[in-house]
Image (cartoon, rainbow, N blue to C red):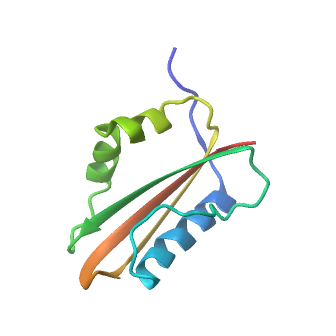
Amino acid sequence: MGLAPLKANRRLSSAARRQSRSQLKNDRFEHASDLGVGRRFRHVGELIARQDGWRIDTAGVALGWKNSAPHRSLIETGSFRLVGVGWARGRLGGQLSTIWTVRLAAR
């Protein structure tokens, strides 16, 4: 049977980009306490990842989430219908990093 495909959502993508930028600005790699999407969604989840150095490896990020039981469980819940992806590149802890944020939601 499988999971239904997720639909891209601009509001979630915008919130994900803001979160990635905020992590760099505040020199902190952590989940958001406020997911920044208001009350438009009844169920929201978040995935974050950090890659250090010049190389950007989206497949590696996805594989990392897939191989992590808590992240995989969130992805495979089946309750999400919308997705937004954001990233930012800059210095985190003095090291060049790419920060990835994914917001998952249902209305």
Residue 24 is drawn in which quadrant? Answer: bottom left
The residue shown at (65%, 53%) is: 9
User: x and y percent of residue 103 in the render?
Assistant: 56, 53
Q: Residue furthest front?
A: 33
Viewer-nearest residue: 53 or 29: 29
Kindly indicate the quadrant of the structure image that contains residue 52: bottom left
Q: Is residue 80 left or right of residue 69?
A: right
**Residue 71 vs residue 16, the one in the foreground:** 71
- Quick check: 3 above or below 101? above
Q: Against 45, is 22 above or below?
A: below
What residue appears at the point 26 percent right and 51 percent down from the top-left corner?
60
Image x and y of residue 18, in percent: 56, 73
What is the count of numbered marks?
Answer: 0
Above or below residue 54? Residue 86 is above
User: For the point 48% across and 31% down, which residue is it?
Assistant: 76
Residue at position x 45%, y 84% from top?
Answer: 25
Nearer to us in this view, 101 or 27:
27
- Residue 3 x %, y %: 53, 25
Q: Quadrant of the C terminus?
A: top right
- 34, above or below 95, in the image: above
- Point out residue 99 in the picture as x, y percentages from the top left corner: 38, 68
Residue farthest to the top? Answer: 1
Q: Is residue 39 left or right of residue 22?
A: right
